[in-house]
Image (spheres, helix red, strand yellow):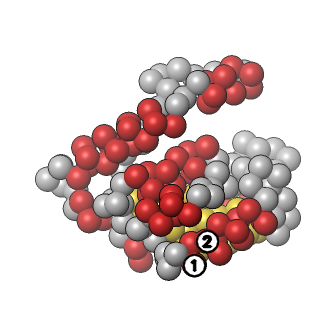
Amino acid sequence: MLALDLYHGKVTSIPSQARKLKRDLPLDHAVGEMKAAFDYLACRADVDPKHIGSLGWSMSGGFALQLAIYEPRLAACVVNYGALPTKLADIEKISAPTLGIFGALDRGVPPNKVRAFEKRMNAAKKLVEIKIYDGAGHAFENPTNILGFRPKAAADAWLRTLTFLNQSL
């Protein structure tokens, strides 16, 4: 496992500063770093390059999917309530089986957008599995999300993730 620090050590607990860090991170820079990380793992003697996957939550979930678009060797992708690609050309580039986990109450990635993504993936004959949890919003798997944490849904999502990765990798 390898966790990337796309902010190079910059951290904050101030929401406005966090939003600025997020806005100031160019997609092409993030994809470049993820591809470099993939290459690093793929060349290690203790890693089978045919069994590398991506996994993320929220913004990093969207980045996990971006890696699936730009890295054809990726073997699996799990996106937890992250941004979804809408362009057919991007979806056609995804070769990794993809698991999407979302909350039915998520206003940032609402169920209609999730179902549209699923429909496009299916139309492009891509392997996709989608789970939308009733009564859950954005970041429902995060125990520090005091009002939005859904322990049962989070436990099920984690089990679903582990099962998917076991089967895909």
Where disc 2 sits, the SS reads helix
Towards the viewer: 77 or 121: 121
Q: In this view, does 54 lie above or below 59?
A: below
x 42%, y 67%: residue: 96
Task: Please tell me which residue lies in front, 117 or 137.
Answer: 117
Which residue type carries mark 1? Ala
C-alpha span from label 2 to label 1: 5 Å
Q: What x and y, as percent, mark residue 70?
A: 40, 52
Residue lying furthest left: 45
Which residue, given by chain and number where applicable, does mark 1 sit on? 123
* Residue at 46% over, 71% down: 97
Q: Tell me: 114 left or right of 77.
A: right
Q: Residue 44 has which mark? A: none
Q: Name the residue under label 2.
A: 120
Q: Is residue 159 visible?
A: no
Give coordinates of residue 18: x percent, y percent: 67, 26
**Amino acid type at mark 2:** Arg
Q: For the C terminus, give its image quadrant.
A: bottom left
| Helix, strand or loop for disc 1 | helix
Residue 67 visible in the snapshot: yes
- Say above or below: 31 vs 96: above
30 horizontally vs 119: left or right: left
How crowded is the residue under tag 1: few (<14 C-alpha within 10 Å), some, or many (20+)? few
Q: Is 117 displayed left or right of 71 in the figure?
A: right
Q: Where residue 138 sits: x, y (%)?
A: 76, 51
Residue at horizontal 36 percent and vertical 50 percent from the top: 1
Picture coordinates of residue 47, whole percent (x, y): 22, 56
Residue at 47%, 66% (x, y): give it.
Answer: 92
Instruction: Check if mark 2's residue and mark 1's residue have beta carbons within 8 Å.
Output: yes
